[in-house]
Amino acid sequence: MKIQEINKLADIYLKLSKGMIDHDKYTYYAITHHSTAIEGSTLTEKQSVNLLEYGQTAGKKPIQDHFMVLDYYAALKFTLSLAKEKKPLSASVIQSIASKVKTNTGETVNTISGTYYTAKGDFRTGTVRAGNRTFPDFKKVPAMVKQLCEKTNAEIERVKTFGEKCNLAFKIHFDFVSIHPFGDGNGRTSRLLMNYIQALFNLPLSIVFKQDRIKYVEALESARNKEDITIFYRFMYEQYGKFLKSEIEQLGGIKTVKEYKKLNQTTDKKKTEFASAKSTKGTTTRKTTSKKKTK
């Protein structure tokens, strides 16, 4: 899917969702469900919504999975409040986000180099591996996170276009998870930082769909191995377009679907910033619909 097309979808989405009762809340529910499911939560989307909306637990599902969902939702709202306040990124800000991700599921980790507590957002003091990959030495983590924040804050002031803003959101996602500064919760925190950048620029938030988890991991690994971040960008633009299209179809019905089809026909191929990867069918992330506010 092309950047110009996604930009148009974002405009349509923002226009349709404006003034919709509880629209943001249910979007946050969807983001929370998919992000926690990627990390192993067994709650279904309906169970996640029931937990967040009504405090209703899912029978026979692990209590840790419930806490993971509750923690992520709280961390998401906190992250978006930072964006609303235009709070600059810093190591302490990122640690505060990470601590909320692990509030009820944190653990004390003892290593030969020291002890850290994940619920406090402590940087790791040991080696972390995921599959065949070993992440940077823990001694380098504080400086790497500081540098990431400084570069990102500078880029926030520089970027202007829709594509530049999206790329920055996806880049901090990629760079942060590649540092892996915490003992746990790195993936969740990286996706929250992506949403922070998007919220800062008043863009629709992104979702990485749980059903695309394998492709997600493959995109991250391929981008690292080939030292080509555009591989990850392409994956994330596909996810972004997939989410926006499914939401637009729910919010706008037939009229907007026709507008979307017209968009496909009129997009100038010569002006695309990225070639389309494999086309994907839009997936509905939630069945809850909202009603417009009445005066």
Image (cartoon, helix red, strand yellow):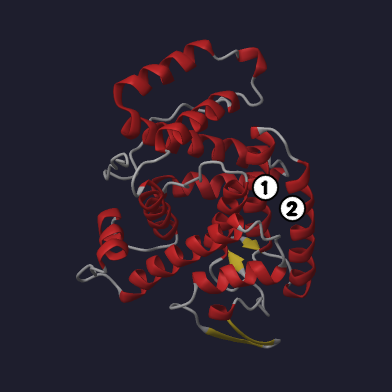
Residue that carries the numbered disc 1 in the rendered image: 171
**Looking at the image, which residue sits at the far front?**
295
User: Within 10 Å of the Cα at label 2, are there few (<14), some (14-19), or many (20+) other Cα atoms?
Assistant: many
Q: Amino acid at mark 1?
A: Lys
Look at the numbered discs 1 and 2 and tell me whether their residues touch, using CB distance below 8 Å. yes
- Mark 2 secondary-structure assignment: helix
Q: Residue 59, how many percent across, how many down?
A: 19, 70
Residue that carries the numbered disc 2 in the rendered image: 152
- Residue 157 visible? The answer is yes
Q: Amino acid at mark 2?
A: Thr
Cα–Cα span, label 1 and label 2: 9 Å
Q: Quadrant of the C terminus?
A: top left
Label whose residue precedes the other's in the sequence (1 or 2): 2
Q: Residue 268, how many percent across, how many down?
A: 60, 13
Image quadrant of residue 87? bottom right
Residue drawn 45% across the image and 65% down it: 72
Which circle, 1 or 2, is nearer the viewer?
Answer: 2
- Residue 181 visible? The answer is no
Where 202 sits versus 256, above or below? below
